[in-house]
């Protein structure tokens, strides 16, 4: 009865089962995986947000496949604030970056075509690819006092079926930003091989060190480039379902791409009017949200480092941006077994590296947006395991 693409393993994984049992037993829990900003005690300007959703203009239906012009102009202003000019006409609004990925995969790929993705990276790609009948091929990020793209390995993974290279900038969970020389190399590879670049910039604004240069791909023109971001992370409002796609690249290719994408977007018209009208105000919220989030992430990172300095078994990998830190821990069992033991013995919940396709055991991922007291206590318990 079902399509092969939905033949997923529907059973909960052992760690999720252990977590459900732990919660059901009412045991204490130090959750170091939290990624939902609305549950982290940040101070939102609730009246401004609610007022933005009550715009009388929302009473009219004025469909536009790219999204309402006012909302796209607000997104263009977001890039202008980063000194990057993006024409509002090159922006398409979507309900999430996941939807943006789907639109791009549908535009570029026939069934069985391939997309290159970084390893380690974000676990949702596998499902997005399955649903769009796309095959994911991984290219390694190497770690050597910092992460870098292994561009030689990336080139070796390209086949006649490759359509695009995904770059997560900064990457989740490694927190590494693409560097200018990596962008140059990527442009050379992609323009020579007729591949597109898909740049996921949902964490772009979250550079953990003030002096970090973080350019956007949104005006990259050497190769066809799809840059995506959205309000889930930028303004900490994932419940609003507001994201976008910026198309850049050689002029003619860009126009043809926008025209094709517009047909896909027109088929769904999935953005609702109240949220589109609220986008300028919701984007405005990012200033206060990002100030709070960065203060917390930096404080938690400093706390982590000070606790790590007092022991010798575990260390932290270099992180430049985003909401997570990666710990290197003794690989005496699988990361999943370790995460289950941490839960049972120390009441600490962390993500094992294999959730993110780390190539070997010995890595745990912790969320830097956890409330400070819970983070400090959770890290202490975690380190006491070794
Ligand atoms: C790298 C990355 N891209 C995209 C998303 C999802 O964003 P959205 O809520 O816009 O689908 C996430 C969520 O954690 C993410 O980590």
Image (cartoon, rainbow, N blue to C red):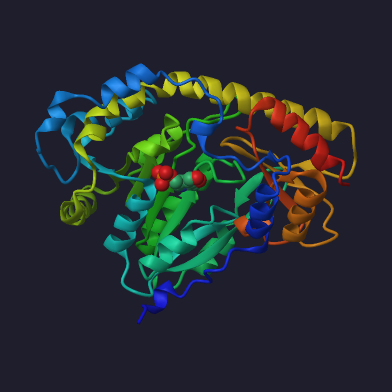
Give residue 5's quadrant in the image.
bottom left
The answer to whether residue 210 is visible is no
Residue 266 in the image: above or below residue 45:
below
In the displayed structure, does residue 213 sit left or right of residue 332? left
The answer to whether 283 is drawn above or below residue 317 in the figure is above
Q: Splitting the image into 4 quarters, where does residue 308 fall?
A: top right
Viewer-nearest residue: 168 or 147: 168
- Give the vertical position of 312 relative to 107 (above or below): above
Which residue: 17% across, 35% down?
68
Expressed as whole percent of the image width and height from the top left, the position of residue 138 reads 54, 64
Image position of 196 with respect to 316: above or below: below
Residue 156 rendering spot, x and y as whole percentages: 54, 68
Where is residue 366 shown, x and y percent of the image?
Answer: 67, 42
**Image spot of residue 151 (x, y percent):** 56, 57
Left or right: residue 152 versus residue 26 is: left
Given residues 194 and 137, the one toward you in this image is 137
């Amino acid at each position: 009865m079902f399509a092969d693409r939905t033949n997923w393993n529907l059973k909960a994984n052992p760690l999720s089962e252990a977590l459900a049992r732990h919660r059901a037993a009412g045991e204490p829990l130090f959750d170091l995986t939290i990624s939902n900003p609305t549950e982290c005690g940040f101070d939102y300007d609730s009246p401004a947000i609610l007022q933005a959703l009550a715009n009388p203009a929302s009473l009219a239906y004025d469909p536009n496949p790219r999204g309402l012009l006012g909302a796209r102009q607000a997104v263009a202003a977001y890039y202008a604030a980063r000194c990057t000019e993006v024409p509002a006409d090159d922006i398409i609004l979507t309900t999430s970056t996941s939807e943006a990925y789907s639109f791009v995969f549908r535009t570029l790929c026939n069934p069985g075509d391939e997309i290159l993705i970084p390893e380690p990276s974000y676990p949702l790609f596998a499902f997005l690819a399955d649903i769009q009948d796309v095959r994911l091929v991984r290219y390694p990020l190497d770690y050597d006092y910092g992460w870098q793209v292994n561009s030689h390995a990336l080139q070796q993974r390209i086949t006649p079926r490759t359509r695009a290279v995904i770059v997560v900038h900064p990457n989740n969970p490694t927190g590494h930003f693409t560097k200018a020389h990596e962008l140059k190399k990527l442009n050379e590879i992609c323009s020579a091989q007729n591949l597109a670049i898909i740049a996921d910039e949902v964490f772009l604004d979250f550079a953990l060190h003030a002096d970090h240069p973080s350019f956007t791909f949104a005006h990259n023109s050497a190769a066809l480039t799809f840059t995506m971001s959205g309000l889930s992370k930028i303004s900490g409002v994932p419940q609003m379902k507001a994201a976008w796609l910026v198309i850049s690249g050689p002029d003619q290719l860009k126009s043809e791409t926008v025209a094709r994408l517009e047909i896909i977007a027109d088929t769904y018209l999935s953005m609702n009017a109240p949220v589109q009208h609220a986008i300028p105000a919701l984007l405005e919220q990012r200033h206060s949200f990002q100030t709070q989030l960065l203060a917390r992430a930096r404080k938690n990172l400093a706390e982590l480092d000070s606790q790590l300095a007092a022991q010798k078994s575990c260390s932290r990998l270099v992180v430049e941006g985003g909401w997570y830190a990666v710990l290197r821990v003794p690989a005496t069992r699988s990361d999943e077994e370790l995460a289950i033991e941490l839960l049972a013995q120390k009441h600490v919940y962390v993500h094992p590296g294999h959730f993110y396709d780390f190539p070997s055991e010995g890595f745990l991922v912790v969320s830097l947006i956890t409330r400070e007291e819970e983070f400090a206590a959770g890290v202490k318990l975690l380190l006491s395991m070794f």
